[in-house]
Amino acid sequence: MSKVDVLLGLQWGDEGKGKVVDVLTPNYEVIARFQGGPNAGHTLEFDGKKYVLHTIPSGIFRPKAINVIGNGVVIDPVVLQKEIAALKLEGVDVDSRLLVSRKAHLILPTHRFLDAASEASKGKEKIGSTLKGIGPAYMDKTGRNGLRVGDLENPDFLKKYQELKDKHLQLLTFYKFDFDIKETEKLWFESLEELKKLKFINSEYFVHQCFEQGKNILAEGAQGSLLDIDFGTYPFVTSSNTTCAGACTGLGLPPSAIGRVIGIFKAYCTRVGSGPFVTELLDDVGEKIRQKGKEFGSTTGRARRCGWLDIPALKYACMVNGTTELFMMKSDVIAGFEKVKICTAYKINGKEIEGIPFDFTAQDIQPVYQELNGWKEFETVSKFKELPHELQSYIKFIEEKVGVPITLVSTGPGRNQTIFR
Ligand code: GDP
Ligand code: IMO
Ligand code: MG
């Protein structure tokens, strides 16, 4: 029987999941998002055009694949409606390719206000949230107050909505925060009508049936392991399990169903929002990477912080995910440097340590770097052996340090700029 493959980010998000899922989709019959929501921005580039998806799985452009929004996802119908409209303009037959779990939770307008109010109240300590209402929506889910897609089919939906909204309005009185509920609510209700046109499913049954029928399923993660609610750089994280276990809870899959665990990472690191970042480059090297890698958020447009590759963090992410293989992205971006650096350990209060600490903020943490020869700019090639030798050495160095094979190397945003080993 085939297994469900999981593709997830190993860093702080934006590793290139959208590109890779789009490239892999011809091998799969079902693509399923298992967590996160409109905080995600997954970019796909082909035929000279660029698309950014937030809620919809990145297999949507391939005519033969069914795309599932799983129970672990939180949906803002306003964002989803915009995504659907943009896809329809491109002639994508969304209605026949997209299914939505009844158990996925809804992001209410007041969730977004609460997110913004909470961040504003934190001042300098803010998380740097995308302000899409993710935290408050997951809080209502775990607090057992949430509204789910399936509730839209019940006659008491409006009553439930009103009760939750009233509760949120009470909470909002604690914050000095201005908001316009009328207009936002109007848009939200309009977009619910669009959401209702989609096919709702009991996704755990659907995914299970596909699995039993031997269909190839790819679970698409959002964010990255270092933003995981349990294993990320808490509290500077998102509110869901972005790691492999999230694919089980976010789709209703038993752990034994999981096959390949594909961890994807950039040849360097980026982070958007606040929080610790040991290898961050605040100099012109960081600026060069940002400009060359176009490191500006796909969802918020914010400049992404940039730095060298962090092996202790990568190893940690591989450990908690049980990563079976690695895909390395954006190796073209750090071409042209005479030397490149890789952080192989952390020095905490002068002492070198293995692994990553419980609390990044309480101590003085310095990266221990190893310097490797850089590689020159290169044309798109199709074979690993045709890559610059120094880049091949860089890849082998990472494999040795992390102990997981790198089976795909991406050298540009396009579909063809992908080398399978
Ligand atoms: P995601 O959230 O993981 O899907 O990643 P994003 O879409 O937010 O950010 C990745 C960005 O890098 C997108 O603009 C991609 O088009 C781009 N990209 C992906 N792979 C490569 C690559 O190998 N090289 C370059 N230069 N860009 C890439
Ligand atoms: P994709 O799927 C990068 C970050 C935010 C913030 C923190 C919490 O495109 O890789 P939230 O809105 O979840 O409350 O924000 O997490 N963040 C992301 N960073 N890529 C993402 O998604 C992200 N989703 C959330 O910047 O620091
Ligand atoms: Mg992104």
Image: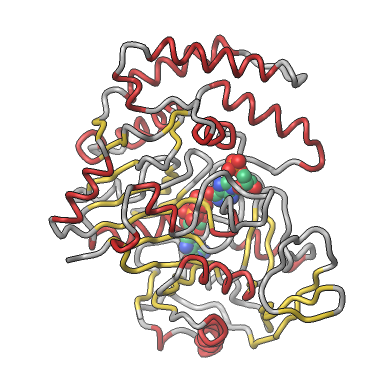
Q: Is residue 378 above or below residue 273?
A: below
Q: Is residue 405 above or below residue 297?
A: below
Q: Is residue 381 visible?
A: yes
Left-right relation of 311 to 327: right
Q: Where residue 379 sits: x, y (%)?
A: 45, 76
Work out which quarter of the rendered image holds the N terminus and state it.
bottom left
Question: Viewer-proximal residue, 173 or 344?
Answer: 173
Q: Is residue 341 visible?
A: no
Q: Where residue 204 sits: x, y (%)?
A: 27, 44
Question: Viewer-proximal residue, 2 or 375?
Answer: 2
Q: Residue at x 81, y 73 (%)?
A: 348
Q: Where residue 318 sits: x, y (%)?
A: 51, 71
Question: Viewer-proximal residue, 373 or 224?
Answer: 224
Work out which quarter of the rendered image holds the C terminus and state it.
bottom left
Q: Residue at x 44, y 25 (%)?
A: 147
Q: Residue at x 20, y 65 (%)?
A: 2
Q: Quadrant of residue 326?
A: bottom left
Q: Where residue 138 sits: x, y (%)?
A: 53, 36
Left-right relation of 21 to 391: left
